[in-house]
Amino acid sequence: MRLHVGCAMWTHAAWDWQPASGDRLRAYADRCDAVEGNTTFYATPTQRTVESWARQTPADFRFVMKLPKPVTHERRLTGVDEEMRAFLTAMAPLGPRIHAFWAQLPATFGPSDLGALAAFLRRMPRDHRCAVEVRHPAFFENPRAAQELETVLGRVGAEWIPFDTTVLFDGAAVSAAEYEAQSKKPRLPRRTRALTEFPIVRYHGRDANARTIEGWQPWVTQVVTWLQEGRSPTVFIHTPDNADSLPLARRFHNEVEAHVPDLEPLPEPTRTEPMTLF
């Protein structure tokens, strides 16, 4: 059984185990086996850069690569063939490391836009899976809208990515980082239904690690169930400043492993450093 865990980035100023320069992704991949590719939303990297990412990670490492902003937000998935060709060409060196291409859609992309999503997904190459994150309230409040979205995704074997911010919004912000996170992140109900063999979860906690850990307990239970069903989930841990997101991701894996003893272990760092949370 395999659970992959990771963070929203592979480098952070608070991670003092990182090399001063050079192969920071390699050091990250010694600790977690998945990462969100958020930077590709803002700019498509050169193929040479992507080749370096491939060299720094094992073949079973999982990148969940966010589609560029012009594709999802500016053009809203319509008339984007040229942009997608350039993006897919740039990503090609990652090969099987690309676990999913991730379309994070704007909050204004609602049920009336599902035709554009269906047409876009039909044009995507079938050698890579797709995953979609929606933020329009109708998909969470209207069962018919949710079913229509699931039908569109199911036709091409795409997954629905939940971004669970329920703990983030459970109470007033207690720091500048929490205030900023609450001002930027979507406030939507928790969704736990998986559509495919490879569910992907984005979970957002709080400044206090104890609150983050307490809040993810429903996901520990859900992930254990998915593993017992033969699924292979990927879970990304976020906090307002993400300083502790990597040791927290490893902590999440350990909690699941306590219920699933034959779970494949995470990689161990090649050099010793403190990974405690308290």
Image: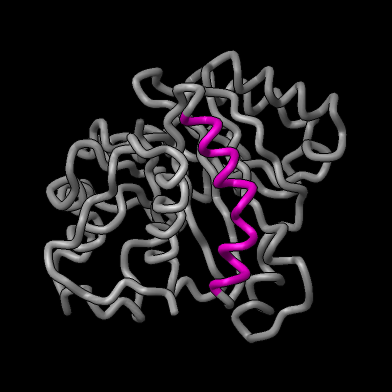
- Which residue sits at x=65%, y=20%? 152
- Which residue sits at x=67%, y=41%? 134
Task: Please tell me whether residue 82 is drawn above or below residue 239 in the rendered image.
Answer: above
Q: Residue furthest top?
A: 155
- Measured as percent of width and height from the top left, residue 245 is found at 44, 66
Q: Main secondary structure of the magenta part?
A: helix
Q: In the displayed structure, does residue 127 sit left or right of residue 199?
A: left
- Measured as percent of width and height from the top left, residue 99 is found at 36, 35
Q: Residue furthest bottom?
A: 175
| The C terminus lies in quadrant | bottom left
| The N terminus lies in quadrant | top left
Residue 225 included in the magenta stretch of the image = yes
Query: Is residue 167 something one can see in this rendering?
Result: yes
Q: Which residues are magenta?
A: 209-227
Residue 238 included in the magenta stretch of the image = no
Task: Please tell me whether residue 11 is drawn above or below residue 142 in the rendered image.
Answer: below
Query: Is residue 36 something one can see in this rendering?
Result: no
- Measured as percent of width and height from the top left, residue 8 is found at 44, 59
